[in-house]
């Protein structure tokens, strides 16, 4: 099998093992190879969990609203609702591990924290669209307001959750005290990127076909393969060599981190087909977030000029999914005074900006400090 004939990820693994066989005819007796294969087999059924104790306080259609009780002093005046992305991965991106938890960063600053967990869509929900997701977000916001007795809350969106939080705020500004948008594509034409170029070059018929193969659902495995296609050597070659080197060196801590991340990264979720197609059309193909009134959600024209609250925009210097210009472009379309718009450029890439140790320690801490000073 040649590299040009590789069609699926397992083919790369077979190539790796074949190379090992040629250099070690007794490979099947090598305990390192046994462990290598065992780990990869376990990762074929990935699972992921929350790092911080929490309770489900609302569950409806594809939404689970989780409350993360703060064991510290909850001195902050307003609660925080975090909207993670639903781009094929699990929502615990915002609470990935004890050492990498945005929830715990907000906890340290005295905030009462809530997260919208987006569940994998089932066939009965294949017709849910953008309006439904904004409706579900509104249900979550109202539940937080009701439980806390606070009229305006802080809304934090990550990646897809960022433009979703932005869209929501433009429709319900009276319920939001501040908006944080992290690594979120808003002005997708501000600078080229692989995802946007593919979405704009490929016809809608292609995306409808993908949805049709899932009987009305956009399968998470296709979304994951799309992300991997932008860094194929990393995901299909280098990671196997990294795993082998960890086993060879006996680096157990590195192995734990590798397995934890792969379980999260490979855990895929399905999207309602209608929701996915509306995103492709309005966000990536037509850049409609930047065009006031170009489309409606819940029967209301979307106009980012309705946003007047303080806004914090985060972007990663090395982000190949959402380049900084696409994220920072948000400031050009809102009515928030310039002195109330903060831009934070992290040193990381896409995932690093959202949950990297350095970003949580430096950049997300800065977000908390700004919120405490400004609101």
Image (cartoon, rainbow, N blue to C red):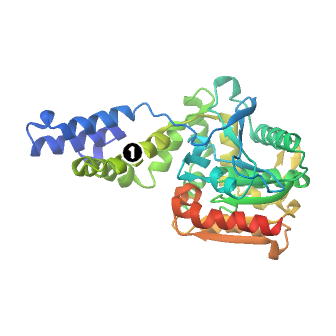
**Percent position of residue 163, x then y:** 71, 54
The C terminus: image quadrant: bottom right
Q: Is residue 189 above or below residue 73?
A: below
Residue 252 in picture, x, y percent from top left:
32, 47
Give the vertical position of 301 relative to 290 (above or below). above
Closest to the observer, 188 or 344: 344
x, y (%) of residue 348?
52, 65
Quadrant where the N terminus sits is top left
Q: Position of residue 295 (x, y in %)?
A: 81, 50
Name the side, left or right, on which 364 lies relative to 46. Answer: right
The part of the image, by quadrant, that contains residue 294 is bottom right
Observer-nearest of 181 and 246? 246
Q: Which residue is mark 1?
A: 256
* Residue 67 left/right relative to 204: right
Please tell me which residue is depicted at 9% across the width and 36% down the height of the picture.
Answer: 26
Q: Nearer the viewer, residue 35 or 335?
A: 35
Residue 191 in sight from this viewpoint: no
């Amino acid at each position: 099998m040649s590299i040009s004939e590789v069609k699926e990820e397992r083919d790369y693994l077979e190539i790796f093992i074949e190379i090992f066989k040629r250099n070690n005819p007794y490979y099947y007796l090598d305990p390192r190879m046994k462990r290598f294969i065992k780990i990869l087999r376990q990762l074929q059924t990935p699972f992921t969990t929350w790092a911080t104790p929490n309770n489900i306080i609302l569950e409806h259609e594809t939404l689970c609203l989780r409350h993360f009780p703060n064991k510290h002093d909850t001195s902050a005046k307003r609660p925080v609702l975090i909207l993670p992305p639903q781009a094929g991965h699990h929502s615990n991106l915002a609470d990935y591990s004890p050492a990498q938890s945005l929830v715990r960063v907000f906890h340290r600053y005295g905030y009462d924290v809530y997260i919208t967990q987006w569940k994998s869509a089932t066939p009965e929900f294949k017709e849910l669209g953008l309006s439904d997701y904004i409706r579900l977000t509104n249900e979550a916001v109202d539940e937080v307001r009701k439980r806390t007795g606070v009229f305006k809350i802080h809304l934090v969106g990550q990646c897809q959750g960022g433009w979703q939080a932005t869209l929501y705020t433009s429709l319900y500004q009276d319920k939001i005290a501040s908006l944080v948008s992290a690594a979120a594509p808003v002005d997708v034409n501000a600078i080229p990127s692989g995802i946007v170029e593919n979405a704009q070059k490929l016809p809608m018929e292609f995306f409808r076909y993908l949805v049709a193969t899932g009987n009305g659902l956009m399968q998470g495995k296709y979304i994951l393969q799309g992300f991997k296609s932008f860094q194929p050597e990393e995901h299909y070659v280098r990671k196997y060599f990294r795993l082998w080197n960890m086993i060879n060196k006996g680096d157990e801590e590195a192995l734990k981190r590798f397995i934890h991340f792969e379980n999260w990264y490979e855990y895929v979720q399905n999207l309602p087909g209608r929701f996915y197609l509306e995103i492709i059309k309005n966000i990536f193909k037509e850049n409609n977030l930047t065009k006031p009134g170009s489309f409606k959600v819940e029967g209301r024209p979307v106009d980012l000029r309705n946003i007047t609250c303080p806004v914090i925009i985060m972007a990663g210097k090395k982000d190949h999914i959402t380049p900084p210009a696409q994220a920072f472009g948000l400031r050009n379309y809102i009515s928030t005074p310039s002195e109330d718009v903060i831009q934070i450029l992290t040193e990381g890439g896409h995932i690093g900006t959202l949950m990297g140790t350095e970003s949580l320690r430096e950049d997300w801490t800065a977000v908390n400090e700004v919120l405490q000073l400004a609101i």
